[in-house]
Image: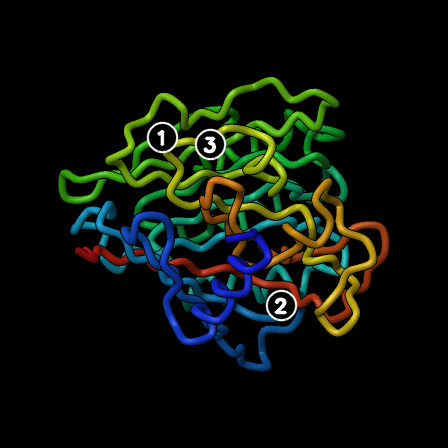
Amino acid sequence: MNNRLKRYIALIIMIFGFLPIGAQTTLIEHSKVKLHCKHKGIGRVKEYTIASSEIPKAFDNFTIAFLADIHYESKFDTTALVSLCSILDEINADAIMLGGDYQEGCQFVEPLFSSIMRNKPRYGAWGVMGNNDYERCTDIITESMQHNGIRVLENAIDTIWKDNQFIIVAGAKNTFADKETIPSPTLNLNNRDFVILLTHTPDYVEDQDITHTDIALAGHTHGGQVTLFGLYAPIVPSHYGQRFARNLKYNSNNIPVIISNGLGTSRKKIRAFAKSEVILIRLMNKSFR
């Protein structure tokens, strides 16, 4: 069966509900959550439900807010930051995960992280760095993240414990060098554990061996930022073009990656048919045997 036919079959299955992955052990469903008009500056909250037999029972209905490409301040301004904080209060996620590219100036770093973490999630917060974050303010960003209780994962892993059970969050270091040589931090993990991989760019999941990853979370592309009715983006900052532009996708080893449109903008303060978004992930313990 060729790759194009596989994609068509996957799309048909996805339209009618859960999408099976791999050996029928994980299913992913997504749905859009409409926002109240008071949340100015945020396009939508998009919810994904991930059901897997590898998710421990203690983590059934565990929620994660994933935020990427905030670029504060850009089109994502002070008003949008207030809206984001209101949304985080409302969804009350168990954990927050961050996908990099946080700022458009060092003066915005501390106000951003202190606002996001004003009501600290019950089980913690984790984040990786984006290309903008390596270009400027790197030390300020890492210090502010740590000061506000956000664990910075640069080619590192951490464990989230709940009722004597755990899941693993791993963070990739995207150096954006011409030749990426840093192996994925997931390689030494156990295939029986449920592993979430944070990476700034979705290209990482195709370029690198990410064995033992159950779900990857990425940003960087902004969903194209400016698209033709959401169907085609003339510019996508990815070596793979439209393939990893947005939404739920899979690498060549059938590992799923959720690619956020992000919250802010770069270069031009404009979005067209590429809504800014908060990703809400809900975990479910479920066996499919």
Query: In front here: 128 or 227?
Result: 227
The local secondary structure at tag 1 comes to strand
Amino acid on which the number 2 mark rests in the picture = Ile
**Mark 1 or 3 closer to N-term?**
1
* Residue occupying the far right of the picture: 268
Left-right relation of 90 to 79: left
Mark 2 → mark 3, Cα distance in angstroms? 31 Å
Mark 1 → mark 3, Cα distance in angstroms? 16 Å
Q: Nearer the viewer, mark 2 or mark 1?
A: 1
**Residue appearing at x 41%, y 31% in the figure:** 211
* Above or below for 119 versus 40: above
Quarter holding the C terminus? bottom left
**Residue appearing at x 30%, y 41% in the figure:** 194
Quarter occupied by residue 135 = top right
Mark 1: give few (<14), some (14-19) or many (20+) Cα within 10 Å.
some
Question: In the rendering, at what x and y percent does residue 234 appear?
Answer: 83, 58
Quarter occupied by residue 123 = top left
Residue 42 got which mark?
A: 2
The local secondary structure at tag 2 comes to loop
Q: Are marks 2 and 1 in contact (CB under 8 Å)?
A: no
- Mark 3, residue position: 210
